[in-house]
Structures are given as C-alpha cells and as structure tokens.
Image (tube, coloured by chain):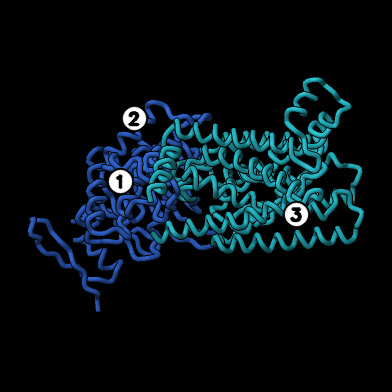
Amino acid sequence: MKSLQKFCTLMQWVRETTSGKAALLVFLTVVLFAAFVWNICTGSTALPLKEALFAFLENDVESSYYRIPIYVRLPRGVGAMAAGAALAVSGSILQSVLNNALAGPSIIGVNAGAGFAVILTAAVMPSMSFFIPTAAFAGAMLASLLIWFIAARTGASRVTIILAGVAVNTILSAGIDTISTLFPDVAVGTGSFMVGSLSGVTISSMKFALVFIAVGLVAAYLLVEGINILALGEETARSLGMRTGLMRFVLLIIAAVLAGSAVSFAGLLGFVGLIVPHVARFITRGDNKMQILVSALVGASFVIICDCIARVIVAPFELSVGIIMSFIGGPLFIVLLLKKRRQVND
Amino acid sequence: MIELKNVSAGYRDREILHDISMVLPEKEITSIIGPNGSGKSTLLRVITSWIKTSRGEVLLNGKRIGEYSPREIARHIAILPQSREIPVTTVERLVSHGRFPYLGLSRKPTKEDREAVNEAMRSVGVWDMRHRQLSELSGGERQKVYLAMAIAQGTDYLLLDEPTTFLDISYQMEVMSLARRFADEGKSVIAVLHDISAALCISDKLIVLKDGAALACGTPQDILKSNVIGQAFGVDIGSYQQKDGTTGYYFIKKK
C-alpha cells in the first residue's frame, strides 16, 4: 500500500511539475542510450564495449571490432530507434486525429498500405529502391485517407472506424500476399518484411526514410497544440477557431509519413504504434507535448531492446524483431488494459 | 452586432431554418426556445458560420460572417457546444485553450493570455480546482470549467447550447446565475434552453422558433401576452407567485 502511494506521488510529480517532466525525459534518454550501447555489444558475435571503443579510436578498419559495430550494428540501432520513434508518434497522432484509442498504424491498415506499396514497388520496379520510402509514404497516406474518408463521410462510431480499418488492413494484406505469390523473387524478402525485421538494414538503404522521419517528428512536435485542441472534440475545437478538417488532414499526412517511412525499411512492425502511445498517455496524462516526446523515446527504446532480445534469445539464430515485440507488447498491453479497467471500476 | 437577414440554412438537402431575420440583442440574456427539431441549435451554428446559409446572410459588425476567418470569429463569438469530450487534461490546461484564437504561430501564451485564463477561472469559480483532472470532476463542475474556457476567449458574444442539460438543479441555477452575471457585465449571452420556465424567469429577451421559423422575438412579458409559446408547444401557460416574490410558470398540455 505504501509503495503504491509512493508510486502515485512520483507520477504526480512527473506529470505536474517542470522538474518532474525534465527528470522523466532525462531518464528515458538514458534508457535509450543504454539500449543503444547494448545493441552495439549484442549479437551472434559478442563485442566487449572496451574492445569496440578501442578499435574505433584506433581507426582499425580491418578489425571485426570496428567493422561489425560501424557497418552492422550502428545502422541497425539507428533504424530501430527511428522506426520505433516514428511508429509510436504516428500512433499517438492517429489516436488523437481519429479520436480513437485503438487506432494504431498496424491496426487500421496504415502499415499495410505502406507495406503493399513497398512490395509492389519492389516487384515491378526492382531497380528503383530509392523510390521505396516515397511509395511507402504514398501507400500509408492512401490507407489513412481511406479510413479518414469513411470516418468523416459516415460520421462513423469509434468501433466502426476500427472495423473499417481492419477491413482495409485485410484487403491490403491480401494484396501483399498476391504480389508475393506472383513475384516470388521480390527483392525485400517478404517473410521477415511481414513481421518486421531490421536484419540487414544499412544507412544508405534508409537514408531517405530517416530524413522523412526527422521531418515528421519535428512537424508533430510543432503541431502539438493542434493535437491538444483536437482532443477536445470536433465542436469544441471549432468553437476555438480551429480549421479542424485542415488540421486533421495535416496531422494525418505526418502520421502517414512517419509510419510509411518506418515500414519502408523495417517492415510491418506491429503493436509499437498502438501500445507505446498508451504507455506514454499513462505516464503523461494528457499533456500532448510530453506525450509526443515520451512516445518517441519509449518507442525507440522498445524497438531497440526487442531487436537486441531477438538477436540473442535463440543465438546463433535470430528472430525477427516483430516477433519479440508481439510477445512482449501483447501481454504488456493486456496488463495496461486491466489496470485501466481497474481504475474505471475504482 | 450580429444581424441575420432572411437566413435559410440546413444540412445537405434538408432546409431547417426558413427566412429568419433579426438583430441579436446585445448585453442581455436572450434565450432561444422551441420544440425539438425547430432549429434552435442550427441557428447557433449558423451564427458561428459552422453551417453556411443557403439563402440570406449573417452579418457580424456589418461584415458578412463568411469573410471572417474561424479564428477571427472565435475572438468575437464563444460557443459552448452541447456535446463534449472529456479529454485527459487538467482544468487549468483546458481553460487555457480558450486563448487559442489569440496565439501566434509559436502557440506560446503571453502574459496577457495567462492573466485572462486566471481571471476566467476566478470569475467562474473553478480556481481552486485548477490542478485537478477533468475526469475527476462532476458533470456540473465540468460545465463550469468549459464555461471558464469560453470566458477566457474574451468575446462579446457567448452562445450556450442547452447549458443546463444533464445538470442537477443546484448546478442549473449556478450556471444560469453565471450567465446573468456575464450579461450584466456586458456580454451578449444567447442560450438555447429546453426549460421554458427558466427561460422566462432569467431571460431579457426570448426568441421562439417553430419548424425553422422565428415566431416571435421579444421580452418574456411580450411573449407571454402574445401566447406564442402556447402556439409553438401546444400548451397552456399558468403562473404563480413564488415564496421569494418572483413568478413561476407551469404548463398544461392542450386537449
């Protein structure tokens, strides 16, 4: 009972005071940094940090202690961080824009839209890999707009939006399966792509996506007041002079850019865009500025930690990060739901 | 000044309001009453330009309302809609959103904005609960917080869409007495009310709507004399002297 009281006091301090918020951000940044270091040292070849640092400082380019971290694990860590942050912030935005706590990019077909476009591009234009992030964004955008259109046109209830999203998801997944069947040699390797994997990513293969993600994250942070106002509901937002249709559209584009960019190199990573915004909301309780920052940091840490576990849990084999994320994320989400329900009942 | 000139409006192919012309009374409480579906809420939405007119025009200070941007309108007219979310936020943060129409691109509130928010919270009586979560409050307390947000907008007009619905009698009286005070302080309060008795007691002017047409606009005494309420609702109105000397009203359905 005492520890619960202490926890509540701590959460109140974190939520309501500037020093608490700053401490939370510093703590999450430290966790992310530690996860990134773990990512450098972990894998089928164990890399003691001291040796890796030594090889790096000596510029010993022939040493595997130099080559593995720089050419394999650094890009992989950067990719994991970027994908995690992008999908988590995308989920946060979607949940606000569609006013629906179940609206994650993997649930309502945004990821599948991006995935379909990526597979299609890889199948019909295999030489134009540089086009993949743009195609992923376009696919994510089209799927988002379709859901938005259904929501706006029908005045659909929250459940209907999710069901419509699930239907869109199913159609696009069928499209992905069709292309995979017709083009078995498709370049992106559909098996790991479908569950989400960071195996083999390089800085050059994700450089466009990284730029899109950086722009998307900054834009999301700058438009956070718009998200705050939208969270008040359509009519109240309009009463305050917001062009709600335009704001929802702009935010939807940002969410699609973020999700599409992440999917373009990390595949269909599920759950992170659904769970992390809930975790962030649990911590921040409605401060959307903090919600975006915490989502980005927790999302980045979550994917990078899951990727490390995926590499060591059945070593020397490697699981796709998406599998680990589902195994950890699923139960975590259920715990969160139970906790929320208990709060409501209390 | 808000003036409606031969306004007809509605949703898609269904016209709700027909040929309404009036100048909204200023610095008073004006209640809009009428049977369900008579177009009361639609009238508020036309005034705020949420619904475009199919014929006629709405003028705000002599200029067509469509020529104002939504933010400019929000600096002149605050509206408390009927249906609202319960966002996860604190009272103070919610009230501070009332300054949204004034914020620049950086969205940073100025000292003046912060003072307006504090003043609004004190004025409505939610200052002591400013750090509490909105979800922890009762329906009546939440209504006052939203009212404080509308006051923080610093507008000349305050539009209330059924502000007392779902509130217990104590909060109904508190909300209406706040509306009275705001009108006395110089705001033009326009309220859609279902409670005709309350509307007759508290309003300076009444607008009676039926089937999208304005049957009458006048003081409660004029409206009572004309028996327009009886026509609109199909009821007979009786009155009685209350203990405090004020007049109460009761209604009997016409046979």
Question: x, y percentage for residue A304?
Answer: 69, 42
For the C terminus of chain B, the quadrant is: bottom left
- Asked if labels 1 and 3 share a chain, the reply is no
Q: Could one spot residue B47 in this view of the protein?
A: yes
Q: Secondary structure at mark 2?
A: helix
| Residue A195, numbered circle | 3
Q: CA distance from mark 1 to mark 3?
A: 58 Å
Residue A40 - label: none
Relative side of A305 to A10, left or right: right
Q: Residue at x 92, y 54 (%)?
A: A185
Q: Colour of chain A?
A: cyan
Q: Earlier in the sequence, mark 1 or mark 2?
A: 2
| Front in this rendered view, residue A290 or B66 | A290
Residue at 48 percent across and 50 percent down: it is A233
Q: Position of residue A271 (x, y in %)?
A: 65, 53
User: Which chain appears blue?
Assistant: B
The residue at the far bottom in this view is: B255
Q: Which residue is label 1 attached to? A: B189
Say if residue B80 shows up in the picture.
no
Tag 1's secondary structure? Answer: strand
Amino acid type for the residue under numbered disc 1: Val
Local packing at callout 3 (Cα closer than 10 Å; few below 14, some 14-19, many 20+) is some
* Residue at mark 2 shares a chain with residue at mark 3: no
Q: Secondary structure at mark 3?
A: helix
Would you identify the image quadrant in which residue B18 lies?
Answer: bottom left
Residue type at tag 2: Glu
Q: Nearer the viewer, residue A264 or B201?
A: A264
Q: Nearer the viewer, residue A245 or A83?
A: A83
